[in-house]
Amino acid sequence: GHRRGELSIVTGPTGSGKTTFLSQLSLDYAKQGVQTLWGSFEIKNTRLGKTMLKQFAQQDFSQSIEGFEDAADKFQELPLYFLRFFSETDIEKVIDAMDYAVYVYDVQHVLLDNLQFMMGTQPAHGGGGFMTRFDAQDRAIELFRKFSTSHNIHITLVIHPRKEMDRAPLGINSVFGTGKATQEADNVVILQRPESMGRDSRYKPHEDLEYRVVDVRKNRFDGELGSVPYRFEKPTATWVELTDMERMEIGLPPLEEEFPDIKAEMPLTPWDAGFTALPQNDHHHPHHHH
């Protein structure tokens, strides 16, 4: 579950599914009434909206338009707002827009996808002239960190990994930048491809089963870390947990065996109404649709 006043950082190689994963996660919260603001700097809002609608309706409208209007009507009722910015945008403008959204719409969750596209390649103007790209990025992270704390909202920030890391297993140091990002973040989540997780990894690539691993590498709240494999269902653009059969296919124990206490502790809603401590294993299952 997400907690207010926190900053989460999500990273993963190109094509690992960061956007669809966050789209689905944010949709889950929005369905529970969490006012949500999306800032999509790499993917146009229309394309993100299409993905979200597919995930929401659990239907591929490119195959058949049936039920589209009904789904679109229901989708429009969700508390979802989208920033109009695209590509390189002045960080102060982004902060101003977030400020407005929190004030006017009582937004509780802001997603920014992603830091590199927002910052662009231009050198930034700092107090004393030009700043390096790293300085500019660190300053942005500081502003987002302060914003989530002072406005008591959750910010989910996507940062691409360092370039040389594309094939290697990603770790906390793979996040592009100086290390400030992961120091400031409350949560760091990495989407991994099994192909690049290394020989010692328990997640082995499988030729008939394409999957990704959602790897929680930092969790300031209760320190619990862990990873869960998901596969992507293309027609509905939805991430689903592997079934026990699929888990066994890639050599993992069934879910109950790995998390014996999970069934007893599944909370009713991932976003806890009182933002109190959440059950231990909650974040292994950002979305439990069975």
Image: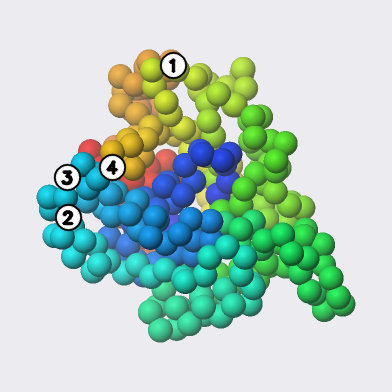
| Comes first in the chain, label 4 or label 2 | 2
Which residue is depicted at the point 73% across and 52% down?
177
**Image coords of residue 238 (percent x, y):** 33, 42
Give amino acid for label 4: Thr
Residue at image mark 1: 207
Give amino acid for label 2: Phe
Residue 64's tag is: 3
Q: Quadrant of residue 75?
A: bottom left
| Comes first in the chain, label 4 or label 3 | 3
Which residue is depicted at the point 46% across and 32% down?
212
Give amino acid for label 3: Ser
Left or right of residue 225: residue 122: right
Residue at image mark 4: 236
Specify few, some or many for label 4: CA neighbours under 10 Å numbering under 14, 14-19, or 20 or more.
some
| Comes first in the chain, label 1 or label 3 | 3
Specify few, some or many for label 1: CA neighbours under 10 Å numbering under 14, 14-19, or 20 or more.
few
**Image coords of residue 237 (percent x, y):** 33, 42
Label 4, label 1: how far apart the Cα atoms are: 22 Å
Q: Are marks 1 and 2 in contact (CB under 8 Å)?
A: no
Which residue is depicted at the point 24% across and 45% down?
62
Q: Secondary structure at mark 2?
A: helix
Relative height, residue 190 to residue 102 (above, below) = above
Residue at image mark 2: 68
Left or right of residue 120: residue 127: right
Which residue is depicted at the point 45% across and 83% down?
103
State which mark lies toward you, 1 or 2: 2
Q: Are marks 4 and 1 in contact (CB under 8 Å)?
A: no
State which mark lies toward you, 1 or 3: 3
Label 4, label 2: how far apart the Cα atoms are: 13 Å
